[in-house]
Amino acid sequence: MDAREFDVIIIGGGITGAGTQRDCAMRGLRTLLIERSDIATGATGRNHGMLHSGARYAVSDPESAAECIRENRILRQIAAHCIEETDGLFVTLPEDDPHYQATFVDACRRAGIRAEVIDPAQARRLEPSVNPALTGAVRVPDGAVDPFRLCAANMLDAKIRGGQVRLHVDVTGFIREGDALVGVHTRNRLTGEKVDYFAPVIVNAAGIWGHGIAALAGVDIKMYPAKGALLIFAHRVNQMVINRCRMPSNADILAPGDTVCIVGTTSTRIPYKNLFNVAVTPEEVDLLITEGAKLAPSLASTRILRAFAGVRPLVSADDDPTGRSISRGIVCLDHEERDGLKGFITITGGKLMTYRLMAERATDLVCRKLGVDKPCTTATTPLPGSEERSYEAVAQRIWEAPSTAQKAAASRLGTDAARLRDDRAGTALVCECEEVSVSEIDNAIERLDVSTLTDLRRRTRVGMGTCQGGFCACRAAGMLARAHGDTDKARKDLRNFMTERWKGNFPIGWGDTLREAEYTQWVYKHVLGL
Amino acid sequence: MRFDTVIIGGGLAGLTAGISLQEAGRSTAIVSTGQNALHFFSGSFESLEEAPERIVGLFARAGIPLHYSPGVRLMPLGTFRPAALSLDDVSLLDQPKFARKVLIVNFQDYQDFFSSFLADGLRHQGIACRIVTPGHLADPSMRVRAGELRSVQIARTMDKFWEKAVQEIRILLKDEDAVILPQVFGLEDPTIPGRIRAGIPARVIFVGTLPPSVPGTRTQRLLKRRYEALGGTYLAGDKVLQARVEGGRVRNVTTRNLGGHILEADHFILATGGYFSKGLKSNPFRVYEPVFGLDVRQEADRSKWYDADFQAEQPYMAFGVETDAALHPLRDGQPLGNLYAVGSVLGATRPELGSGAGLALRSALAAVDQILSPLDL
Amino acid sequence: MKFQAYTVSKYNFDECMKCTVCSVYCPVLQVNPLYPGPKQAGPDGERLRLKDPYFFNYALKYCLNCKRCEVACPSGVDVAGLIQAARIKYGQDRPTLRDRLLASTDLMGTLARPVAHVVNGLTGLRVTRAAMEAALQIDHRRVFPKYSGRSFESWLRRQAHAQAAYKDQVAYFHGCYVNYNYPQLGKDLVKVLNALGVGVQLLDKEKCCGIAYITNGMSDIARKNARHNVSVLEEAVHGRGLKVLTTSSTCSLTLRDEYPALLGVDNTGVRASILIASRYIYERLEAGAQLRFKPGFRKRVAYHTPCHMEKLGWGVFSERLLRRIPGVEFTLLDSACCGIAGTYGFKSENYEASQAIGVPLFEQIRAVDPEVVACDCETCKWQIEMSTGYSVEHPISILAQAIED
């Protein structure tokens, strides 16, 4: 068999693409995933990292809400090491419509979401950071999910099942045979290498970039990029997700995630051409702090680590300027039916929470086209690393007396933490803020397709802590230089990485963030000589 | 307590001023909020192109030998930077191609010394490199420590075992004419780097590591010891909470630890550093000087504080306390007549004063000269 | 308030820049490879512990709470406070019988005092020490402080009438050590203060400051003591209008700073009135008070700044007081930890580390070769005397010897 021939090619390394590749691989297909950048660089990785219960959509979009809670329950079973069961609160503040709560609870129950009305005093006990002025609260099964980890675990599982992954590779064109697509032209963005790959079915799972991919195939999909800005705080302020009990609006979710918490979002339509350069404006920062402090007042005086923005891929024909009233329902387009183009599928819409269901629908269609009759088993098969429910149990089983770094590794890798080397060299720390060891970096380089420091960050949390790469980036760059045997590239990569970190720092560059920046910039320039 | 001069800030600028004034027979106190940027010192006094005898003498009396030779130094990521006046640890090179073949020695599991970047940088200069990380250079106690391994931990071990390291390197050395070692030698004893050079039959170049800087930490300790030996009062871990200003002059300051026991002086020196050291503080609305509320040169619009390029000159770094020509800082446009601002609180660079360590030393000595000059009284 | 005009965090841990200067000055990290160091144990660990208390690391028990990390931190992070608070909040190890005994400095004193000669004889015996090592993991090489047959409290109580005659009055928090082990220091203080025209009063039944309970995982007892002590301090400060003097740097730090920071006991009403005696005396002398010194007094003194004195920032007062004594030849030792850290060094598992930590200080003392080492901490005294053979005295005792009787 030609190494460039597959049963299915999936374009897009976000969660939808990764999930689809896994599902296809589990049904015995030979898969190739192509991603223009790295995993989870689009909407997948640029959000709250929230395991939605669906409650947020219960009133506005009951169908999405019901999907959401079903997938929420499934992810708790299959992706234990990527999620954290925190529960969430929907709080009513004095300025909010007091009647909305009843509507909300009713809608949640109809969608199958457990929604427990609790009194404000109990809410304050459960979540001490919550605005003490709240007048009502509803407890729902929200949680936290690490989208990078989830994406990497799906891709890893596909690879374990024979799938192939090409990152930093652009699809530059399609290969046609009559009215069918049969392959893609690609170009590696790092090496410039051009390769053609062939498959009878090609899945467009490129998120917001899917618009352009479709255009490349000669079909037209209307997508509306809506920018959402978020702020990351330097430590966890809250243990439960805090939502506003009102119709979805600006900065009404504060979600805990790993060692930080994230408030967001804003929502602004942006022109498609601005997609590659979304910057957070001072106005957005101010709005996020002001509104965020209504959820948890201490945010007004908590150190902010970063500002970032994502772009929601909204598929719609209506012209609501905010992009919020659009259904987030799953859109699975068979272009043979829709446009008369064979061998091409677009899977889009939906959201992080429903990625598995999206993948299932896309894979069902792929299988139909290929004449494969195998049921979907992704809802019952744990992802690699998630064979055990709690990281405590994992750590305790692997190590007699786990150190903090080993506990942290177990929380990130789940049962895969058993692969880490325990020797002195392996346990040396690279990232001290997040306690990431040498062996964890080695593991990522070896198994998770790492080309750059930014790739490494998404898979390990290196550089995500309070020093924002100040100390760990050059250590990790040294390791990448050795692994790839290219020091020149590693030096450029280090420069890019620090610029990328700075991009998220300067919009909130005051106080301790500015101190950290001065220190880091001084060290890199005058001490290290970058 | 009453002093001739109270110095706020115990880093390079504050200690230089304190030692100079004590040497001139003045009584001084230094209020130091924690340790300082000397712990991140590269070992070279940037922007001091001339060889100032006065500085060399001051450091020599503190037991810190400096050497002067305009040239370049090798940076940890394999690049070269101009350097002239430096600690003895730093090798000042005539040119980047300083050797034919180099042996780079690192410690096993030590992440903060970048051998591959160094080797790559040297290869660009046409210098061949061999990297070795002998596993048995360290003492047994180092072997069990997992987690963070920083320069200072290795240096403490090397203070005891440096001679063993020298023997080891002599064995490893083949036809190389130079050896590169991380700056992890002589934390306590400043003569060790020199003795290592003497013990190895090749040119020995010490190259910096990730902070903390071993030569910088040692320099801080020796300067402080010198200052205290001269009778200076070093109030470590204390902080000025409040200052009393009357008639355009500072009368006294109140500190956190001494509380009601105020510090009075004829002169005050503000050597509190930049942002890192909290000599300058910032919030979304402004950059400010927290001790005296001095005027700070800055951009009003926050978006103009930064350049999106990490490596560009950052506008915020140029912000600093406004002074008159005599380094008297301004408050509401008026100079405070017995207060001097020195070091990074002035901003990262100042015309005539330079930047970094050069700025710290030049401005500190300028303040000292005025305090010692009878005209000032 | 304007949003983000300033930021705050518990023990300032968010202000950590990861610069690692704390680790440079941590005495434990230098000798104990099992200790993760102040940065990891403090601000780094705190972010993880906030996620899940499971990330608490038992190795935090190796922190000896010397607070040198806090003095060194360029960012103002209360590193040791963070570590001790984490031990209180998350630590699950139950204190052992040994820890309970060591921590109960007041109870031990009460029990031992009436039979002091027996206890002193016993703790001096090799066989007893071996038994203590075996049964309690108290290191057999450790020299135990002697107990005094008569408590300082009972001595001063008999003096109450005479003390009341002085024009100015202060209260004295003598602490367990002066009361049970070394009443002479209290007597020396009374002598000096009387010479300055100041009478000394007891508090209304002080209890142990509680530091040993805090570091041995018995913060509930410490909190009870703290509440009691704050109330008796309030009675002295507000009821009797007195300043409260201490001679122990650790007791001072505990009463002033650890009560609110670690135990949540509010002491704002009395905090500013708690002063170490050398500061009070120095200030009286500065204000013009006179002492009559013995004409022929000569002593070569080297002053060691105890860790908690360094943290209080008050070493300068003891130093200046000693320098004022005619006939004193003064050397200021480099500020460094002696390694004992209260009950820390008594534990078998810490003995080696404890001794190793003290080496640079011991070497400097030998090099200076003074007649006496001065320091304001009782446990430093035991450690330095045991480890160097040099005798150690409190600055107040040296002052008492130098003035006319």
Image: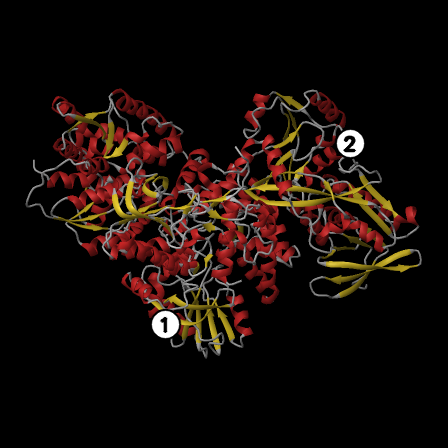
Relative horizontal placement of residue A277, taking residue C374 as reference (left or right): right
Looking at the rendering, in which quadrant would you find the N terminus of chain B? top left
Mark 1 lies on residue:
B197
Instruction: Report in which chain the residue with disc 1 lies.
Output: B
Residue C183: quadrant of the picture = top left
Q: Residue furthest left?
A: C296
Residues beneath discs 1 and 2 located on the same chain: no
Q: Residue at x 67, y 46 (%)?
A: A45
The amino acid marked with disc number 1 is Arg
The amino acid marked with disc number 2 is Asp
The one nearer the camera, C2 or A323, is C2
Residue C60 in sight here: yes
Measured from the top left, where is residue C19 in percent x and y? 45, 51
Relative horizontal placement of residue C73, taking residue B28 as reference (left or right): right
Instruction: Find the distance from the CA under tag 1 to the CA under tag 2.
Output: 74 Å
Instruction: Report in which chain the residue with disc 2 lies.
Output: A
Q: Are there few (<14), some (14-19), or many (20+) residues within 10 Å of tag 2?
A: some
Q: Are there few (<14), some (14-19), or many (20+) residues within 10 Å of tag 1?
A: some
- Assign a secondary structure to mark 2: loop
Relative horizontal placement of residue B45, taking residue A95 as reference (left or right): left
- Assign a secondary structure to mark 1: helix
Q: Residue at x 7, y 37 (%)?
A: C404
